[in-house]
Amino acid sequence: MTYPAFRDSGGLLDLYAGARGTYLQRLYSMFPNAWPGKGLLLLRLTAGGLLIHDGFSGLSGHGPLVIIVRQFIEVITGLLLLAGFLTPVAGILIFLVQLWIIFLGAEYLPMAIALATWGAALAMLGPGAISVDSILFGRRRIDIGNR
């Protein structure tokens, strides 16, 4: 049963839900810790480090604007992955940029394919418990003490 006041209207209630992080919570039912969380952390650190290295190594300020923008996006998404902040957005951006690189004919095709795969996997799996996303949007445990 839906109450009229809480119907998904696409207006103010949606804006509030987005600001409170319920969209990210709906996207991932849990933020895994222990070994799965450490595996996601390793995946994030590896992909983020490679993106930052790739972005800074080619970011000389010379060349076409498209290349400079691509490398800037790589650095920003790498930093987002290292922190585990806005992981689904960063994963989708990584996937799209690397797919663009693959179709343009990259020099390092295996690395572009690996980064596109890691970006898609992180967008689908989530950041894990060791992340800023988990702190901001993760589940909360409420302990009610004895009365």
Image (tube, rainbow, N blue to C red):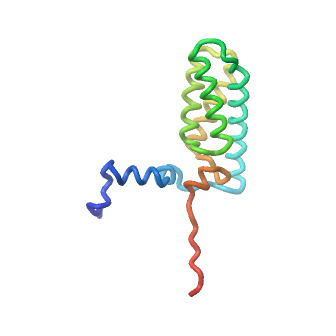
Q: In the drawing, does residue 133 fall left or right of residue 107? A: left
In front of the other: 47 or 76: 76
In front of the other: 81 or 43: 81
In which quadrant will I find the N terminus?
bottom left
Looking at this view, name the residue that lies furthest to the top.
63
The correct choice, above or below, for 123 with respect to 146 in the image is: above
Q: In the drawing, does residue 22 fall left or right of residue 63? A: left
The residue at 67%/56% (across/down) is 33
In front of the other: 10 or 112: 10
Total label count?
0
Looking at this view, name the residue that lies furthest to the bottom.
147
Residue 48, horizontal then vertical, whole percent: 68, 36
- Quadrant of residue 77 in the image? top right
The residue at 73%/28% (across/down) is 53
Residue 122, horizontal then vertical, whole percent: 60, 41
Q: In the drawing, does residue 131 fall left or right of residue 4? A: right
The correct choice, above or below, for 107 with respect to 71 in the image is: above
Residue 32, horizontal then vertical, whole percent: 63, 55
The residue at 68%/21% (across/down) is 59
Looking at this view, name the residue that lies furthest to the left.
4
In which quadrant will I find the C terminus?
bottom right
The residue at 44%/50% (across/down) is 18
Looking at this view, name the residue that lies furthest to the front.
61
Residue 98, horizontal then vertical, whole percent: 60, 25
